[in-house]
Image (spheres, grey):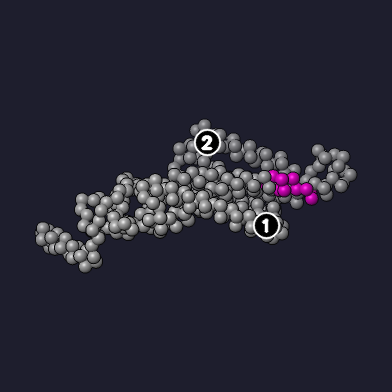
Amino acid sequence: MWGYIALYVLFAAGIYWLDRSIHRPLFVRTQNRHFRWKLNFNVKHWAVDEYLAAMVMTCAVVLQVMMMLQWLGSTLDKTLAKWLFAVLSLGSIMLAVRLLRLVERYTRHKGWLTVLAALLTVAVGLVASAEADAFILGQTRIEPGQFPGAQKTLTFVYLVYIWYLAASLLLAMVMLIGALVFGMMAPAFKQRVRRSHTTAICWNLFVPSSDGFRRQWVNASCVLGVIYTAVILLAFSEVVNSKLRWASHELLVYASFHLGPEDCTMTGLPAGTRLALLAKGGVVVAEPAGELYRYKEQACSLQTLEQVEAARDERIRAARATDDYF
């Protein structure tokens, strides 16, 4: 009960703050006898930025309400929350790009930015290659060059992971600082206001126009969306980090372990066991151990395709002979 009262108090406080901050009546009377009051808000002169800001604010408010309801013990659909997070992040990024004019800034400086991105990619690629070799050597105790397919696959995965981790930490920080400096300060707007003698003398008594108020809440929506985006990226990076080890094992087995136990006439191995052929003639056996794999090197007498098919047919005939169904 107290949770619902707190939710109502927060909603009333938000309405009160909005009513005091817009410097005009929040609701006005109409001539319609069915709807005597309407919201004193007009979207006739809205542009793309205003619609993006409204989308960001709506997603943020809905998410806050869902968090409050979840805290009160209600069961909510997580799929809706994921879609709201995705829409909020995409909308805030688009709004920040438009407000900060990042496309125009990149066009003016694309030369040295392209060179910097290429150098960073080379450096990150070297780090990713080292991480991939370290993982293969640490798990199999065999020289990583014996698994060229796994080397390339894991290098690509680590490259994407490092870029994403750097982006989740730096991109949100850069967007937040840029939105605060270029969006909330609004230098052109302040210079235009300060040139007026009235507002220069009585700055504290200045009441912004509808355009000024619209610019303020668009910039505030941008900052709020960027903060949410930063939190979402950091939280998702934790999820990716927790799944990276499992994904590395699966990709190592998928990329380089192409043989089955029957190719070396091995028996008694658990289901899902895969083998990788080595250049010196032996094999590396990858046995499932929970969600990961356990690796060991064994000798192998590689069978021909005809021998494998003959052994498979023999097992099928033996199974049919002992099964009453057949």
Magenta span: predominant SS is helix
Indicate the quadrant where residue 198 lies. Answer: top right
What amino acid does circle 1 point to? Answer: Trp
- Residue at x 82% of width, y 40% of height: 203
The answer to whether any part of residue 212 appears in the image is yes
Tell me if label 2 and label 1 are in contact, CB under 8 Å.
no
Magenta-span inclusion, residue 1:
no
Image x and y of residue 275, in percent: 30, 55
Q: Bin the neighbour count of mark 2 within 10 Å (Cα to Cα): few under 14, some 14-19, many 20 and up.
A: few
Q: In this figure, which residue is indicated by the disc labeled 2?
A: 4
Tell me: residue 266, above or below residue 61.
below
Magenta-span inclusion, residue 181:
yes
- Residue at x 48% of width, y 40% of height: 70
Which corner quadrant holds the C terminus? bottom left
Q: Is residue 283 left or right of residue 33?
A: left
Image x and y of residue 32, in percent: 67, 53
Foreground: 131 or 298? 298
Image x and y of residue 165, in percent: 53, 47
Image x and y of residue 243, in percent: 43, 47
Q: Distance between the residues labelled 2 and 1?
A: 55 Å
The answer to whether any part of residue 47 appears in the image is no
Indicate the quadrant where residue 278 lies. Answer: bottom left
